[in-house]
Amino acid sequence: MVKILASMGVSKVRMSGGEPLMRRDVEKGVRLIKNVPGVESVSMTTNGYFLAEKAEALKQAGLDSVTVSLHSLKPERFEEIVGRREVFSRVMEGLRKAREVGLKPVKINCVITRGCNDDEIHDFVELGRQTGMVIRFIEYMPFDGRHAWSSDRLVSGREIIAKVEERYRLVRLPREAGSTSVAYRFVDGPGEINVITSMTQPFCGDCDRIRLSADGKIVPCLFSRDEYDVKKLVRGGASDEEIAEFIRSVFRRKFAGVETMIKSGRVSPLIRPMHTIGG
């Protein structure tokens, strides 16, 4: 599939989950993907639990960058969020090891939720400034799998930036076409933060993501339940040209996106659990 997509112009591949580091010999997958002609970069999104022990092998296999999901810098709060004890120190060690072996950039995904971790915005900014990691603040989206999402708990990107600017002067950087985030740098020194405004300022207009789920489904839009089974074609002996045409046909039917849902006032409290597709 990567070979076919690369022949169609895809140059960046992100391995996600679930949790990609639970897969045995995941570094072999990294190496195979990185060696596909046309693939310029391979990155990974992970919860960081196994990152310390895997970082060096991943770097040697060709992984370029890594993004770790980290929604609190308070150990007890973090472990309450993830539902497991004695994991915070492992994740922080994984982040340290990723920087040590030369994965770059190392990014942190932090979903800001009102009443949960919105008091830690400055703490995350300081972590980024001190370590060089890119902090990516993400608006709370209806992907928790528990029907718990509510717009009352959403902290907008505008609010997040206003909070940061209470202490720091920022310069907004030009947005790359198709980017899911808006980037800012600090006026007084190095460092970068990103804000992902999926709910208040969606980027549907030029979204160019192609997602392939673990069970062989193409998912053109996170905010739609539409899925298209490409596994049958792959296992049924279809040619590369037939699979490429199937991919094109899927994207001709792509859902209009969350922007349409917001304008109509119909945002479901549960679209899909994020752990089934990884972002």
Image: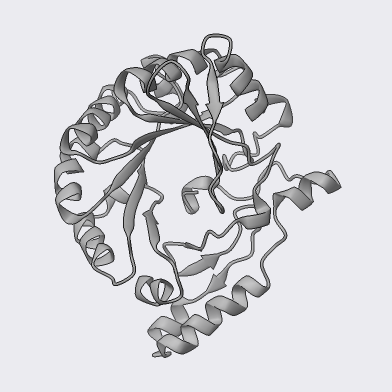
Please state the horizontal and vertical placement of residue 226, each as a whole percent of the image: 64, 65
- In-front residue for pair 222/143: 222
Q: How many marks?
A: 0
Q: Residue furthest right?
A: 264
Q: Is residue 114 visible?
A: no
Q: Quadrant of the N terminus?
A: bottom left
Q: Answer left or right for 144 relative to 266.
A: left
Q: Is residue 277 visible?
A: yes
Q: Answer left or right for 141 relative to 258.
A: left
Where 41 sits versus 156, above or below? below
Write down the quadrant of residue 119 in the picture. Answer: top right
- In-front residue for pair 269/190: 190
Residue at the image position 43 percent from the left and 90 percent from the top = 238
Q: Residue furthest top?
A: 167
Residue at the image position 46 percent from the left and 81 percent from the top = 232
Where 115 sits versus 137, above or below? above
- In-front residue for pair 25/121: 121
Residue at the image position 28 percent from the left and 35 percent from the top = 49
- In-front residue for pair 244/178: 178
Please state the horizontal and vertical placement of residue 62, each as a whole percent of the image: 21, 55
What colouring does the structure picture have? Answer: one colour
Please state the horizontal and vertical placement of residue 42, each as a whole percent of the image: 32, 55
Write down the quadrant of residue 123 in the picture. Answer: top left
Residue at the image position 60 percent from the left and 39 percent from the top = 146
